[in-house]
Amino acid sequence: MAVSGASTGNRVTNAIAMASRRTGVDFSYLLGQAKIESSLNPNARAATSSATGLYQFVDQSWLAVIDKHGSDYNLGWAADAISRGANGRYYVADPELRQQILDLRKHPETASVMAAQHAADNKDYLEARLGREAQPVDLYLAHFLGLGGASKFLSVNDRSPNATAASIFPAAARANRSIFYDRAGNARSFADIRDRFAAKLQKGVDSIGGGAIQYADASLPDGAKTVQPADYVRIETQRLASAADVTAVPQPHTARLAYLMLATLGR
C-alpha cells in the first residue's frame, strides 16, 4: 500500500523528538534544521554534492559521526567497519557495507539521533571556548561556518556585535553575499547575521505547524537508545511501494542490514 505524506511526516517529527530526548539537544533546533536542510524529506539528495537525508550529511561527515557515536545506538557493526586513513579521511573496506552505512542517512531515526549527537559535540566545543551556553542559532552557525569558523564568529560577536562580519570572513562573504551584505551592498553586522539565522530556524519550525509538534511530544521509554532494526526493512518497503498499491518487497541488501542489526541486538 502506498504510504501517505502525513504518515511519513509523523514518523520524521517523532524521530526528531526521540533524538532530542536521547541527547538533550533542543527539539526546535533539530526540527528547524531538518526543515531548512531537506524540507523533512528523508530521501533528499543534493544535486551538487554527496549530501543526503534529513540533515544532508555528506559522506565523510556521516562516516565520522557513525564512527564516533554508532556504538551508543547499537550500530557497533557500522562503527567497527569504519577506519580513518593517514590523510584523515574515513573509509570502509567493503564497498557494499559502505553503501549500507551511507544509506542510514535516509533512515529518519538514525539520521535524527546522529544529527543530534553531532550538534551536542558542537555545543560542548563552543561552550568550552565561549564561556557561555550555546544557543540553537549558535549550533546552526557551526553547521554553516564549520566549528572553527563559528567559534571565531561567535567570539567576535560576543565582544563586538555591531562590527561588520565580512572583513573577518572575506571568503565566506564572497561565497554567501546575501548573508553578509544587505540589498544595498552594506555589510551586515555580526549581530544582524546571527539574528537572521535565528529567524530562519524559527521560520522552519513555524512552517510545520502545531500538529506535527504535538505529535512529536509523544513519550518514549527513558534511556532508550536502540534504533529498531525493523525500521530498515520498513523504510525500504515504503520507498518501493507504488501509488497502485503494489506490494513491495524489501531488497536483499536491506534485509541483510536488518539481520546485522538483529544480531547486534542479540535477538
Image (spheres, grey):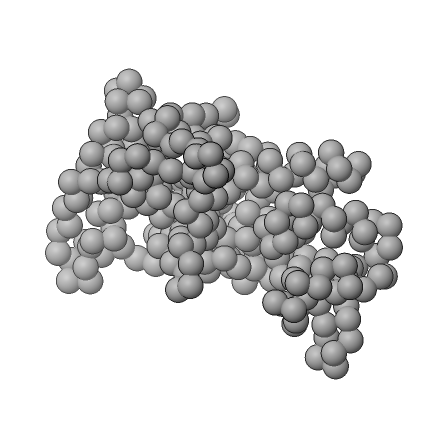
Task: Report whether residue 109 is seen.
Answer: yes
Residue 66 visible: no
Closer-to-camera residue (50/32): 50
Q: Of all residues shown, which one is farthest toward the bottom?
A: 184
For the residue pair 196 and 204, the one nearer the viewer reads as: 196
Against 143, is 121 above or below?
Answer: above
Residue under the image location 31 percent in, 39 percent down: 98
**Identity of the residue drawn at 40% across and 54% down:** 50
Residue 204 percent across, percent down from the top left: 56, 59
The residue at the point 70 percent across, 79 percent down is 183
The answer to whether residue 35 is left or right of residue 259 is right
Where is residue 266? Give x, y as percent.
28, 18
Position of residue 260 in the picture relative to residue 170 (left or right)? left
50 vs 266: above or below = below
Location of the C terminus (image quadrant): top left
Q: Quadrant of residue 99?
A: top left
Above or below 237: residue 188: below
